[in-house]
């Protein structure tokens, strides 16, 4: 377009030149005419000169313009380096300089733009490469994340498989083998492999002396290099065979311990990327592999522990069975030995001479000694097996101690020793096992008396600010050397062998005593000086509200106490032996052992009662219904129906429920027996005094002469009093359980009628306190209530009371039945 314009300019210049020439020719005649020929020549010369000058000027100007037009056209066509060579100080020169300057600027601008465009292209290329790398890294991190999740598995094979799968994919290696190093033996075991024809590596990767073993030996990364490539194995790709070019061995470490070996191989050479990926993997792999191996070890140990535990349980079961069998097998003949030798000592037929009586006494004495030894061994066996149970309940330690002192006083009197009992401070009632604590007192006081020749024995109860209670047993006996103070608590150990020979004993008493004290969360200590005596101190914790208050004034909550809080069954009392035997009472003796039955029959019949012998449980239930005995003695270990089942059926039958049942067995669980409805439980062999006490208490016939009515309803008290007025000798009343306890301090009734819902101290709480009292716990109680009791409440009360009367029913008839039953 611009070239076309320049052509137009040239045509215009030529046209202007012709016009000037024609104009000059036109004025020549006029010049001739006006001036003459002279002037005409001058004019013609001047015109020609002007024409030539004009033509030269026009030509020069046209050339300069053409040059500028060519430069402009080159610039227009993109040659920004084009410049015009036109010079001069005229307008065209100035125009030329302006065009050159403009071209320079355009060229510079385009150079800068080109540079920037190139930079932009490079930036875009770099950004694209970075994006590709980031995307690749993201995919790698995502794959690594999935791999880390897989490492949470506890299956070693699964971890190995996942590791090879991840590494071969990320490193583009072709083959992989994972070896696990066994703990202990250190042997390498192949647990996973990946890749085509991995068996081609078998010769190279022998675990005994091959490449993996070398990795373990050198504890570092190894690569196979600097060898003839032809020596590396070929692998079958399916369509052809190819030769490996690189093999990498990596130890898997955890805390400097080699757990396994990774073998990776490829048909190309290794690069830094492969090493980086493998390096980032094996660190985490070591921790995961250690966790899995630890889990496997723990599982194996758990299985072994479970198996060992089962074996221990079986051994414990066998031990318990052995102890039970030995208890039965040893105590059964001892029962006969002690019992029949005791009958011989009484010489009822009068046909034994003094020598025979002496023999019988020796048999009886040594039988009892053997029985004590057996009891101690069996108790120690129970303690060691953790089978000695505590029966925790409210206990009056002062009353308990006085009973033990009174029981052992004859032994002290026989040795001309004083036996005193003192208390320091207010001695509270507290929660403990009264029977076990009584055993501790008997052991300590018995030892003190046995090892004291002169002087005496003193027992003191000391309350330590209401938090602890100390029992001190002090004697003036032979004392104990300092180096033996701990030895005496070990099984079968005494101060020395001469002590055992002189004083006898099993050496188990103090062992059992310390074990019981520790079971009661207490401590036992001893201080002694040889020749001066010893002091044993038992320190027991006092816990609970009842433990911080003296009995019987116990602060009880006004809210009803749940039946299960009535407390444990109290221990057996020592009954007086001065009461006259019961004539005509009927006693059903149930025992499968004929010697035991005969022994019981001889003793019971000697007291004036009538014995009905029975050898099995089924027959006992039938005879109890037919004969209606006044008392049943029941053995537990019998063939067929055992004693527990007999006791349960006797209590379930309304016709036999009222008959008192006493458990007399080799193994007598007193608490279980009392819970199931027995009135007492004794362990064979029993003495004639114990048997006499049972008969005197349970089969004596007496009328109900003294009654206590406990009810907060005045109308109910008056109604009961009116019905009982002509049937009892003395009747007293109380409006709640607290007042009833105060009445019982000075009045011992034959029967208590008790309401359950009362203010201050309700019937449930009163029963709990009553059954915890050593002197009052056997008092019969009849519940008289309008409360609709739940089945659980009634079952619990049935074990603690002798009957129920529902208010609003035929009261007089019920009272008559109760008085007849209790009498």
Image: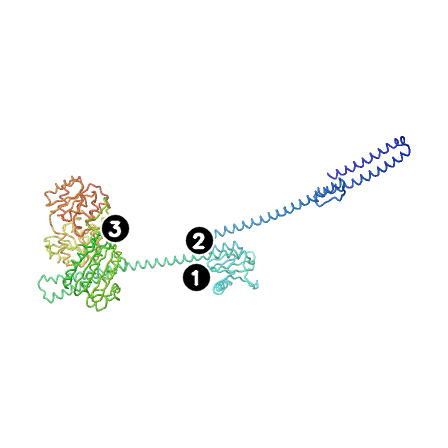
Report how far apart the C-alphas of labels 2 and 1 lie in the structure: 20 Å
Farthest residue to the right: give it.
37
Q: Quarter of the image holding residue 400? A: bottom left
Percent position of residue 241, x then y: 56, 58
In-front residue for pair 589/710: 710
Nearer to the camera, 105 or 191:
105
Residue at (42, 58) in percent of width and height: 293
Indicate whether 3 appears above or below 492.
Answer: above
Answer few, some or many: residues within 10 Å of disc 1's Cα (few below 14, many 20 plus, some between 14 and 19): some
- Does 701 sit left or right of 179 as displayed? left
Residue bearing mark 3: 544
Horizontal and vertical percent position of residue 436: 22, 56
Residue 435 sits above or below residue 801 on the image? below
In x, y percent, where is residue 440?
22, 59
- Mark 3 residue element: loop
Classify mark 1: helix, strand or loop.
Answer: loop
**What is the C-alpha distance between the residues marked 2 and 3?**
50 Å
Residue tagged 1: 182
Q: Mark 2 near mark 3, Cβ–Cβ under 8 Å?
A: no
Chain-order first, disc 2 or disc 1: 2
Q: The N terminus appears in which quarter of the rendering? A: top right
Mark 2 neighbour class, 10 Å CA radius: few under 14, some 14 to 19, many 20 or more: few
Find disc 2 in the rendering and name its residue: 152
Q: Nearer the viewer, mark 2 or mark 1?
A: 2
Of badges 2 and 3, nearer the viewer stands: 3
Could you classify mark 3 by the number of other residues whose Cα lies within 10 Å: few (under 14), some (14-19), or many (20 or more)? few
Q: With 594 as the anchor, is 141 left or right in this view?
A: right
Query: Is residue 115 positioned above or below 202 on the image?
Result: above
């Amino acid at each position: 377009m611009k070239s076309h314009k320049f052509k137009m300019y040239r045509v215009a210049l030529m046209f202007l030149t012709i016009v000037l020439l024609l104009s000059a020719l036109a004025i020549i005649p006029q010049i001739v005419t006006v001036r003459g020929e002279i002037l005409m020549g001058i004019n013609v010369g001047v015109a020609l000169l002007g024409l030539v000058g004009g033509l030269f000027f026009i030509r020069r100007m046209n050339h300069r313009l053409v040059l500028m037009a060519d430069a402009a056209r080159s610039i227009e066509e993109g040659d920004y380096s084009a410049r015009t060579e036109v010079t001069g100080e005229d307008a065209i020169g100035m125009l030329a300089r302006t065009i050159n300057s403009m071209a320079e600027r355009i060229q510079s601008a385009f150079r800068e733009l080109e540079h920037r465009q190139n930079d932009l292209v490079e930036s875009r290329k770099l950004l694209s490469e970075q994006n590709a790398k980031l995307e690749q890294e993201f995919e790698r991190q995502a794959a690594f994340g999935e791999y880390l999740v897989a490492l949470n598995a506890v299956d070693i094979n699964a971890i190995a498989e996942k590791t090879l799968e991840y590494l071969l994919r990320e490193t583009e290696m072709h083959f992989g083998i994972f070896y696990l190093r066994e703990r202990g033996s250190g042997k390498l075991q192949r647990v996973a492999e990946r890749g085509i024809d991995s068996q081609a590596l078998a010769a190279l990767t022998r675990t005994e002396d091959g490449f993996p073993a070398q990795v373990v030996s050198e504890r570092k990364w190894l690569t196979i290099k600097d060898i003839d490539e032809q020596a590396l194995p070929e692998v079958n790709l399916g369509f052809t065979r190819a030769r490996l070019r690189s093999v990498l061995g990596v130890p898997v470490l955890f805390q400097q311990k080699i757990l396994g070996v990774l073998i990776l191989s490829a048909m190309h050479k290794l690069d830094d990327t492969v090493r980086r990926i493998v390096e980032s993997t094996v660190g985490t792999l070591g921790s995961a592999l250690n966790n899995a191996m630890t889990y496997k070890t723990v599982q194996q140990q758990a299985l072994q522990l479970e198996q060992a535990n089962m074996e221990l349980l079986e051994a414990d079961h066998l031990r318990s069975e052995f102890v039970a069998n030995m208890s039965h097998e040893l105590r059964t003949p001892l029962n006969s030995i002690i019992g029949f030798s005791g009958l011989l000592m009484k010489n009822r037929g009068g046909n034994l001479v003094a020598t025979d009586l002496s023999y019988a006494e020796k048999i009886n004495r040594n039988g009892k000694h053997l029985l004590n030894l057996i009891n101690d061994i069996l108790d120690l066996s129970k303690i060691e097996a953790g089978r000695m149970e505590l029966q925790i309940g409210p206990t009056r330690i002062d009353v308990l101690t006085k009973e033990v002192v009174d029981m052992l006083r004859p032994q002290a009197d026989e040795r001309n020793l004083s036996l005193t009992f003192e208390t320091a401070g207010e001695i509270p009632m507290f929660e403990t096992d009264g029977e076990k604590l009584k055993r501790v007192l008997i052991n300590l006081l018995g030892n003190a008396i046995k090892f004291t020749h002169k002087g005496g024995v003193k027992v003191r109860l000391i309350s330590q600010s209401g938090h602890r209670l100390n029992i001190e047993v002090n004697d003036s006996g032979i004392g104990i050397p300092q180096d033996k103070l701990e030895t005496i608590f070990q099984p079968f150990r005494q101060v020395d062998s001469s002590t055992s020979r002189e004083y006898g004993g099993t050496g188990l008493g103090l062992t059992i005593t310390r074990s019981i004290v520790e079971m009661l969360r207490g401590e036992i200590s001893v201080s002694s000086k040889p020749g001066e005596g010893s002091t044993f101190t038992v320190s027991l914790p006092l816990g609970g509200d009842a433990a911080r208050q003296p009995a019987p004034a116990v602060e009880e909550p006004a809210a009803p106490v749940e039946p299960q809080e009535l407390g444990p069954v109290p221990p057996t009392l020592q009954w007086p032996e001065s009461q006259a035997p019961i004539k005509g009472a009927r006693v059903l003796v149930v025992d499968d052992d004929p010697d035991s039955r005969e022994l019981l029959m001889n003793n019971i019949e000697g007291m004036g009662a009538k014995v009905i012998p029975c050898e099995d449980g089924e027959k006992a239930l039938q005879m109890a219904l037919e004969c209606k005995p006044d008392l049943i003695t029941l053995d537990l270990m019998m063939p067929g129906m055992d004693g527990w089942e007999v006791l349960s059926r006797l209590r379930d039958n309304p016709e036999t429920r009222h008959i008192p049942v006493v458990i007399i067995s080799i193994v007598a669980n007193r608490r279980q027996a009392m819970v199931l409805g027995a009135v007492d439980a004794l362990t064979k062999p029993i003495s004639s005094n114990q048997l006499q006490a049972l008969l005197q208490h349970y089969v004596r016939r007496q009328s109900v002469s003294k009654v206590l009515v406990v009810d907060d309803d005045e109308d109910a008290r008056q109604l009961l009093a009116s019905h009982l007025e002509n049937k009892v000798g003395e009747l007293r009343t109380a409006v709640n359980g607290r007042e009833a306890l105060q009445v019982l301090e000075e009045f011992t009734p034959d029967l208590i009628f008790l309401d359950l819902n009362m203010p201050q101290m309700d019937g449930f709480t009163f029963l709990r306190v009553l059954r915890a009292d050593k002197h009052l716990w056997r008092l019969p109680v009849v519940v008289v209530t309008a409360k609709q009791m739940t089945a659980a409440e009634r079952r619990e009360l049935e074990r603690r009371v002798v009957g129920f009367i529902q208010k609003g029913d035929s009261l007089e008839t019920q009272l008559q039945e109760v008085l007849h039953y209790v009498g």
